[in-house]
Image: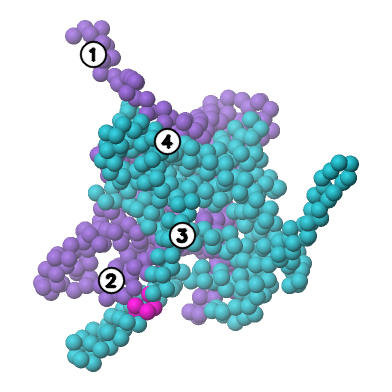
Chain colours: A cyan, B purple
Amino acid sequence: MSVLSDIAAEVKDDVRAVAQTPVEAIKDARYTLDGIREGRVSAASVAKTAGVTAGAVVVVALLLFPLYWVAVGAFSGTGASLYSSSGIRLWPSDPTIRPFLWVVGDIIVPSYRITFGLGGYELFVQTPKLALLDVSNYGVTETSNFKKFFVNSLTVAIPTVLLAMSLIVPGAYALSRRKFIGRSKILYGYVLFTQIGGGLGVALLIALYALFVQYGFNDNKLALSAYYAATAVPFNTWLLKTYMDGIPVSYEEAAMMDGAPSWKIVTEIILPLSKAGLATVFIFTFLTGWTEFVVAQTLLSTDNYTLPVGLYSLVGRYSIPWARFSAFALTFAAPIMLIYLFAQRYIEGGLSFGGMEG
Amino acid sequence: MSVVDSAVERAKNTPVVTKEDAPLLLVLPGLFIFLAFMLFPIMYLVYLSFTNAEPATLFQGKEQWVGFANYVKVLTDGQFWNSMWVTWLFVGTSVALKVLVGIGVGLVVTGARVRGKRFMRALIIIPLGLPGIFTITIWRGIFSSAEFGLANQFLRLGGFQSVAWLSERWMAFVAYNVTEAWLAYPFMVIITVSALQDVSEELHEAAMIDGAGFFARFLHVTLPSIKRPVLFASILTAAASFQQFLIPYVFNQGGPSRTNELLIVYGYREAFRFQKYGEGAAIMLVAVLVIGAFMMLNVWKGKLADGVDDA
């Protein structure tokens, strides 16, 4: 799995860069102090820089405060503390991981009895019960439906990715490397839809719902996957196409000179060189199904709820069980946030396409 | 030239699919599925908007053609015009807020004296990667009408009375705007930052030599250079504001008592809450037409699909 090892290497670089930041900062500070002592830098200028930077840090902190507030909520006992009268808390009053235990629930592999016949005798092997996590040991008796929603989300997201990739990759290749009738019109339509039509889904929901019900597809997770794959096509095809545009044509020409058939050029040159692009598209198509709410909520019944719908179902009409809700929300969103932080460089590239750079 | 000749001429100039176009086959499956889930529902929506469809009739195939009755009913309904008005007001206020926040934060994280800019930028655009439903339910908690929601706590810090955010019309509207601004600021910041980095240093230095202060330089050097990309981003983000559904839906279903139903929420509720599919479809089609107008505006104003032809 060279893709995985590449990703691992990049993550390692990122982590190292982040870890070295304080060291670099201290070095800088020391250098500046030396500068002041030797009279190279004026103290007033340094003070101004420090002041402005502190102001910027305050702005960043204020912008991200809601996220921090959720984290504090998730680690608080039973939810009361967030609405307590003692003002805004910067630290949970009674730190506990119980809300998370409530979210995750037991992780127990039940014992299986594997039986096989052998010449008239019946042998069986009893596998031991594996209790990886038994939350009742920590005083958590009832648990959330997180695992059920998680499985539902997976059964929606995996077919979405498979279908979407099989549509997007050939399309992106053709749009990037071949000339054919209607090519620029298709691209133009895709970009327009991506930029403006993102919210069309809700506008079309009435028709979509009526159609799904009439064809008996409502509450069908596979049909929902097909819908997600369809909505993921325009943006991701464009993204992968722009990525493939960056691969020098000379590689293919060289291979052609050597007499390689065009399918081989695709599998040996184009696909291996677009690994990063493929990984990004993979993540995006996965997240399409993983995070969509409105359509899933309208089409699915309680038993088939995906994670976003499950999250919303925690929001009562008048009050939210805050600690549990925060823990549930964070467990749902934190992995996405991490993936996103890593993929940020590609996303920024994707966002700046068309117009922005011209 | 006779009619026949011109017809022949036209036929000659009409592009036809030839063997050279075989790669089209690689694009068609994706295009087909995309259209099947987008274009087909749009056409069905048009049909529904001319019928009296309700769950009771539609799923038995008993809906009846009623012509323009739904449109007449919707367009003479005060509720519709209230929604239309609130929606455009929301577009106006939220876009203004988003542009202000975007430029403000953009200036902060590109400031010459700010240290650790790259790190800050990476942190600041995190909300872009968060699922919408996550962000919006969190903000609902922030604006909790309960005495000690985060927004109320901040008000108390400032010595103000706490507010029942979601059950007062304009307070709810303010809450929508703040949340929308927080949802969209990363996008605005990315665009503003990349525009700010293109502002020429020489112009700034020349202005400084001429004795221009910070605000004068911002007004006469920075603003003209970032105007185009920011305008372009504003069109895009205005389209997003116009289509906002989740914030009102999650906060208070467009309430209190239907006063803040943005257009899409109004159509959704007519259809799914009050079971009037036909009228809901008519409302949604009006919304789709406006979104189409946004697309035209984009083609006309922004150079959005420039990359298509030279790529």
Amino acid carrying mark 2 in the image = Gly
From mark 3 to mark 1, how far is it between C-alphas? 60 Å
Q: Can you give x and y, in whole percent of width and height, for residue B205 in the image?
A: 14, 70
Report the residue marked by disc 2: B111
> Which dot, 3 or 4, sits closer to the camera?
3
- Residue B188 found in image quarter: bottom left
Give the structural element (helix, strand or loop) at label 1: helix
Mark 3 neighbour class, 10 Å CA radius: few under 14, some 14 to 19, many 20 or more? few
Amino acid carrying mark 4 in the image = Pro
Report the residue marked by disc 1: B9
Q: Which residues are magenta?
A: A21-25
Question: Which circle's residue, 2 or 1, is located before the other in the chain?
Answer: 1
> Which dot, 4 or 2, sits closer to the camera?
4
Q: Is residue A326 visible?
A: yes
**Residue that protrudes farthest toward the bottom in the picture:** A37
Give the structural element (helix, strand or loop) at label 2: loop
Q: Nearer the viewer, residue A250 or B245?
A: A250
Amino acid carrying mark 1 in the image = Glu
Amino acid carrying mark 3 in the image = Ala
Discs 4, 2: same chain: no
Where is the N terminus of chain B found, in terms of image quarters? top left
Report the residue marked by disc 3: A8
From mark 2 to mark 1, how far is it between C-alphas? 61 Å
> Subunit of mark 3?
A
Report the residue marked by disc 4: A170
Give the structural element (helix, strand or loop) at label 3: helix
> Are the residues flagged by discs 1 and 4 in contact, CB closer than 8 Å?
no
> Subunit of mark 4?
A
Give the structural element (helix, strand or loop) at label 4: helix
Q: Is residue B77 visible?
A: no
